[in-house]
């Protein structure tokens, strides 16, 4: 699989990585043996990049990855984690003492001395303007608790603020055919600054797979049930902030754009991979089959201009009014 340098880390990662929110919580229960099978299928398919967080299952996702890394020390995996969402979301909680405690816990969960990359996990907006926060992150690097730091953001303005910080290695942002705003300013600014872009929520919480209908029901412990309107965390994390009924109809149109031999989900991933400035896209998977199918998107030929134009037209007609001004 193609490898790209992840911004200021200087490390190469696969263009299709693996997001592991599903392996921790909020998508229904996943058994430990099934989670490990997903990790193994991804690696065997060429994935070298895992993305996790201390909040996914309150550490379960990190612990599962840690076990896998111990069992497969030869796999050459770059692991990015996140910190901050286990605490009350107040700017004053983003300080050096907490950063040390949070990264020490993640290091123990993952079984490593130094974290490859730690990302602030969608922190309160005032955090981005705090010099003390970024000084503290620099201290973590100096102390070798982390090799590099980054930020996972909700909005384009937050992304631009993070890119302006000289120590920011990468920015993780929602990017998919139903969320095009980052293409306007964020990706060009990141490319100019040498900052990596990690694209998350690439399938709009599964909408872009084309498998859902208006009548699809998700389990009670799935965020697509309990956070559909932003009840638990930012609404943009669920269906990319798109109304479910609108999203289902738009996804049916998108499915019609898939090239022969590619699924709608693979088409969405291929679209993301070929956006200038993107380093890696991190779809999740709940089965080995999903992990393998996601990885196969990296081998698809670039989508032709008519398909790219059709994606833009679909977004402008059905989605833009719902999400563009907010995120």
Image (spheres, helix red, strand yellow):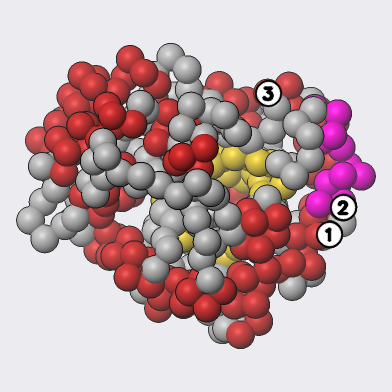
In the rendered image, which quarter is residue 284 located in?
bottom left
Q: Is residue 98 magenta?
A: yes
Q: How far is disc 3 from disc 2 in space, using C-alphas? A: 22 Å
Q: How far is disc 3 from disc 1 in space, using C-alphas? A: 25 Å
* Bounds of the magenta segment: 91-102
Q: Residues within 10 Å of mark 3 (few under 14, many from 20)?
A: some
Residue position marked by numbered label 2 in the rendering? 101
**Is residue 58 toward the left or the right of residue 190 in the image?**
right
Instruction: Determine the secondary structure under disc 3.
Output: helix
Residue 121 lies, with reference to residue 155, above or below; the image says below
Picture coordinates of residue 211 (x, y %)?
A: 24, 49
Instruction: Determine the secondary structure under disc 2.
Output: helix
Q: Residues within 10 Å of mark 1 (few under 14, many from 20)?
A: some
Toward the viewer: 237 or 91?
237
Residue position marked by numbered label 1 in the rendering? 104
Residue position marked by numbered label 3 in the rendering? 125
Toward the viewer: 233 or 323?
233
Q: How far is disc 1 from disc 2 in space, using C-alphas? A: 5 Å
Picture coordinates of residue 166 (x, y %)?
A: 68, 36
Toward the viewer: 197 or 122?
122
At 87% from the left edge and 52% from the top edge, which residue is drawn?
101
Is label 1 in contact with label 2 (beta carbons under 8 Å)? yes
At 66% from the left edge and 63% from the top edge, which residue is drawn?
60
Residue 288 lies, with reference to residue 177, above or below; the image says below
Determine the residue located farthest toward the right in the rendered image.
97
Instruction: Determine the secondary structure under disc 1.
Output: helix
Toward the viewer: 271 or 258?
258
**Is residue 180 toward the left or the right of residue 169 in the image?**
left
Which of pointers 3 and 2 lies earlier in the amino acid sequence? 2
Q: Main secondary structure of the magenta part?
A: helix
């Amino acid at each position: 699989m193609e490898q790209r340098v992840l911004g200021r880390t200087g490390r190469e990662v696969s263009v299709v990585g693996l997001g592991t929110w599903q392996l921790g919580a909020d998508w229904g229960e996943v058994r430990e043996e099934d989670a490990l099978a997903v990790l193994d299928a991804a690696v065997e398919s060429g994935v070298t990049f895992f993305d996790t967080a201390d909040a996914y299952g309150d550490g379960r996702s990190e612990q599962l990855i840690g076990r896998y890394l111990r069992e497969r020390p030869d796999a050459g995996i770059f692991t990015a984690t996140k910190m901050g969402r286990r605490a009350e979301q107040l700017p004053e909680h983003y300080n050096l003492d907490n950063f040390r405690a949070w990264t020490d816990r993640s290091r123990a969960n993952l079984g490593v001395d130094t974290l490859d990359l730690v990302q602030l996990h969608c922190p309160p907006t005032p955090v981005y303007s705090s010099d003390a926060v970024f000084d503290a992150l620099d201290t973590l690097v100096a102390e070798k608790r982390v090799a590099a730091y980054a930020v996972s953001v909700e909005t384009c303005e937050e992304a631009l603020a993070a890119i302006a910080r000289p120590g920011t290695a990468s920015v993780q942002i929602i990017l998919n055919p139903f969320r095009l705003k980052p293409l306007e300013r964020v990706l060009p600014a990141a490319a100019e600054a040498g900052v990596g872009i990690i694209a998350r929520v690439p399938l709009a919480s599964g909408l872009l797979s084309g498998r859902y209908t208006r009548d699809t029901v998700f389990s009670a412990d799935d965020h697509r049930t309990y956070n559909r309107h932003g009840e638990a965390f930012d609404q943009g994390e669920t269906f990319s902030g798109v109304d479910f009924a609108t999203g289902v109809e738009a996804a049916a149109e998108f499915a019609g754009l898939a090239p022969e031999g590619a699924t709608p989900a693979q088409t969405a991933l291929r679209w993301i991979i070929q956006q200038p400035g993107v380093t890696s896209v991190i779809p999740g998977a709940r089965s080995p089959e999903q992990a393998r199918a996601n990885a196969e998107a990296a081998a698809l030929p670039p989508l032709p201009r008519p398909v790219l134009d059709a994606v833009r037209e679909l977004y402008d007609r059905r989605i833009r009014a719902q999400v563009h001004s907010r995120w």
